[in-house]
Image: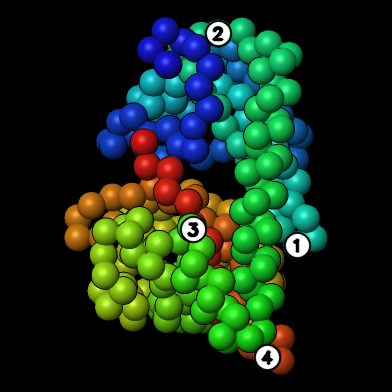
Amino acid sequence: DPVGGLRVREGWSRDPRAPALRLPDWVAEHGDVVSHDVERDTTFDAASRSALRMQEVAALVMTVRAGRGQQGASVFVAAARTPRHWTTAELNLLREVGERAGAASERAAAEIALTSSEQRYRAVVEQAGIGVAIADRDTRLVYVNEQYCRTVGAPREALVGKRIEELTHPEDWPESAALLQRVLDEGVANTVEKRIVVDGERYWLRLSVVPWRDADGEIVGSLAVSMDITG
């Protein structure tokens, strides 16, 4: 909060001109990062500190949660606008929140992806309180549920048939494309945060992407469960 108190949020995007924050690859390999003062922390290089400064992040915690099965690791981030000392109690709380959020996202993606009955599938995704989008192997959207439409402020007919690249901010597409290719080629699930652009409006989404398979188990596309993290 404005005086530096702990505040757990789904997203943190104070300045729309700020560059996307790229977590270093080694975070998932080496575990949690706790920074009491970003400006003095040698963990971050100059570019990362500048990006965090534009987002008004002066202290942060990144907790890593290893995925289950083929799920990739996910990172939960909490931040403060002024330098602060993160207490043991706060760190334990953040790890617990990150664990629960990651587990819930994985369960939602896995339940939908494993649904073999078309009727059951429709019932699950249309009643879900989270956005769901399905794309074919050419990355063209073939289905979006009502919650996804509400999140991005567009009707279903304006989204179905669009390629994912058309809806992704140009700066975020290279990373998104690489992760999506792994889903399609290797069947490896991934989580990504990126900007979706619809009619000039930008929305930050956290997407848990899993392979979409046919009745024979062949990967025929991708399924994304989305959470709006627009600040």
> Is the residue 4 above or below the residue 135 in the image?
above
Q: Image quarter for residue 168? A: bottom left
- When the figure is inspected, residue 205 is found, relative to residue 27, above or below; the finding is below
Whether residue 105 appears in this view of the structure is: yes
Disc 1 + disc 2, Cβ < 8 Å: no
Q: Residue at x 47, y 76 (%)?
A: 135
Labels 3 and 4: the sequence-earlier one: 3
Question: Which label sits on residue 130?
Answer: 3
Instruction: Please say if 181 is above or below 231.
Output: below
Q: Residue at x 80, y 60 (%)?
A: 69
Q: Are marks 4 and 2 in contact (CB under 8 Å)?
A: no
Residue 1 as seen in the image, left or right of residue 16: right
- Spot the residue most to the left: 199
Label 1 – label 2 distance at C-alpha: 36 Å
Question: Which residue in the rendered view is the most extreme toward the bottom?
Answer: 216
The residue that mark 1 highlights is 70
Q: Nearer the viewer, mark 3 or mark 2?
A: 3
| Residue identifier under label 4 | 215
Q: Earlier in the sequence, mark 1 or mark 3?
A: 1
Residue nearest the viewer, comparing 50 with 225: 225
